[in-house]
Image (spheres, rainbow, N blue to C red):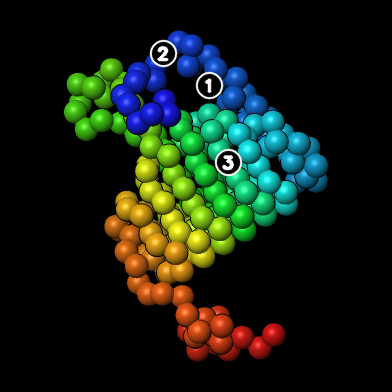
Amino acid sequence: MHEGKIYFCNDERLMDEQLQCLDRLYDFNQTRPTELKKREEMLKEMFAEIGEGCYIEPPLYANWGGKHVHFGSHVYANFCLSLVDDSHIYVGDHVMFAPRVTVAAGTHPIHPGLRSKQAQYNMPVHIGNNVWIGANSVILPGVSIGDNSVIGAGSVVTKDIPANVVAVGNPCKVLREIGERDLEYYHRNLLIDL
């Protein structure tokens, strides 16, 4: 599963293990908004790694319930984060996920004969520190996103994105570098007056 090679995801042993993870994810998604401590403890059990100060708004969707997900500290995920965590997903510190973001480490071969047999392969995803992923964005298998970058809403990230840029579109492309103007204006011509 973690070597980028084709395997069959309908293997009974894999399916049994995955179901146990999905049961725990179901329990997480049924927690009450006031049960923050319970959510925090559950995420520590569910995820491969999770740092301090992380907040994930249910519902959370994850193929393996977060078993192959590595979150740094102070990660914020708005509702409906989907993690196709059939292989490892690495997320740095201070990352923000807007609503309905999908991060996919798993995929399937193009040939229909292989797909009909439930063939699959996986490529890890790496998201750096201080990254903001806009609403309804999709991060595809094998992609890396550099530190401090912003991915615009609705983007489909098919290739690596460097650090310190704003990138948008389908396929996602670098629009511009983050610069001095971003210290003066927070939106178009609206001045930061803090």
In the picture of the structure, the residue carrying the numbered disc 2 is: 11
Marking on residue 70: 3
- Which of the 4 image quadrants contains residue 162? bottom left
Q: Which of marks 3 and 2 precedes in the sequence? A: 2
Spatial CA distance of label 1 from label 2 is 11 Å
Position of 192 relative to 23 (above/below): below
Quarter placement of the N terminus: top left
**Residue type at mark 3?**
His
Position of 119 relative to 61 (above/below): above
Q: Nearer the viewer, residue 163 or 78?
A: 163
Residue contact between numbered discs 2 and 3, judged by CB atoms under 8 Å: no
**Residue type at mark 1?**
Gln
- Name the residue located 60 percent from the left edge and 19 percent from the top edge: 20
In the picture of the structure, the residue carrying the numbered disc 1 is: 18
**Residue type at mark 2?**
Asp
Q: Nearer the viewer, residue 23 or 18?
A: 18
Is label 1 or label 3 in front? 3
Marking on residue 125: none
